[in-house]
Image (spheres, rainbow, N blue to C red):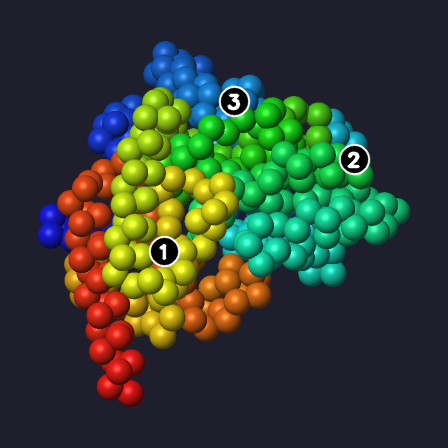
Amino acid sequence: MSTNRIYLDWNATAALLPEAREAVLDGLDLCGNASSVHREGRAVRARVETARRQVAALAGADPAHVTFLAGATEAANLVLTPDFRMGRRAVTLGGLYVSAIEHPAVFEGGRFPADRRHEIPVLPTGVVDLDALDAMFAAHDKSLGLPMAALMLVNNETGIIQPVEKAAEIVHRHGGLLVVDAVQAAGRMPVSIAALDADFLILSSHKLGGPKGVGALISRGETLMPAPLVRGGGQEKGHHSGTENVPGILGFAAAAAFAADDIEARNTRIAALRDRLEDGMRAAAADVEIYGADLPRVANTSFFTLPGLKAETGQIAFDLEGIALSAGSACSSGKVGESQVLKAMGRDPRLGGLRVSLGWATTDQDIDAAIAAFAKIAARRRAAGQAA
Ligand code: PLP
């Protein structure tokens, strides 16, 4: 990153942690194949299994239930399928229910056919509508197979924490399965697959400060597992064939260890920065609307609109001031579009929201610069409004 740039887009991707970089480099130098029985192979296997324990610890999971994959999108495509296995027996699920604010990785529904995918509405606050979930699961035709719900623990645009434990109670009362996308939650709040009562959890390395292109699907048990997406040599207990991405896995584990350590102190510091930013924005423009400010949110995210300022225009204006932030989510490069989340909340999606997201390297000076840039942009908007 250039030193005169300020990076406030950590929900798109976090800056690589020095510890993760070291671990990746270390992994590149390891010669053996983890499946080989000789000493070199066994040494690599030992490193991969240590990494598995570190990733499991971040999610309060059993290491035996961690499957390493090429990122959260691949994890979603693996688990969101009607085609499950209970030992050798095939089990077919009858439908997938995803909330309207899911990341496209989940929203697209994985391997479920379009006519088996259903959208759970979201309340105007940006929180998933649990009564609707209950009604949809009650109406689900079980003769098709049991239902599955996939929900995010933290929304990537607003940072709002979703009521996943309550959703789990509903889903399980109706005999369904719950997949939790914990990509934006891990490292930003304590995450435990058991406390959430989720059946599956999805994690991504690069949101934690690890390398891109590596993630994990974590299961609660091993009895009921999705049919593999990638078949071949049977690595990862057959759930993900192909020689393990050792540098990626070691980097992921280093980031997971960092994320799990001292989470409270880190979040206290980041929350203070975020609160100062929001106070500064309110002082510069009283009409700024900050979404989820009164709801449980993770400490690092602020999602806002400034009436009269389009998200694309705002993003470019901040960029010109040296600040990288995002207009909604960054699901594909250069795509600045309507906010799916604002739309789901019943707002005009064309207005778009601007998202500032902070991370381990964010400083007081970064926040000062962001407040100054915001004040400048808000003043220009006021002047333009008066001239019109
Ligand atoms: N889920 C959420 C909530 C995300 O924010 C992202 C990344 O933007 C993903 C899933 C996809 O993760 P990955 O980039 O590892 O495929």
Left or right of 287 in this view: 226: right
Residue 284 drawn at (x, y percent): 25, 61
199 in relation to 356, above or below = above
Q: Residue at x 40, y 32 (%)?
A: 187
What kind of element bears circle 3? loop
Q: Which residue is mark 1?
A: 355
Please, what is the three-letter code of the amino acid marked with disc 2? Arg
Q: Residue furthest bottom?
A: 388
**Counting other residues with Cα less than 10 Å from the Cα at mark 3, is it few (<14), some (14-19), or many (20 or more)?**
some
Left or right of 356 in this view: 230: right
Q: Nearer the viewer, residue 204 or 274?
A: 274
**Counting other residues with Cα less than 10 Å from the Cα at mark 2, is it few (<14), some (14-19), or many (20 or more)?**
few
Q: Earlier in the sequence, mark 1 or mark 2?
A: 2
Residue 83 drawn at (x, y percent): 72, 43
Please, what is the three-letter code of the amino acid marked with disc 1? Arg
Q: Nearer the viewer, residue 99 or 65?
A: 99
Residue 265 numbered mark, or none: none
What kind of element bears circle 1? strand
Q: Nearer the viewer, residue 257 or 362?
A: 362
Please give the count of numbered marks on the rendered protein: 3
What kind of element bears circle 2? helix
Q: Which residue is mark 2?
A: 173
367 in relation to 64, above or below = below
Q: Which residue is mark 3?
A: 60
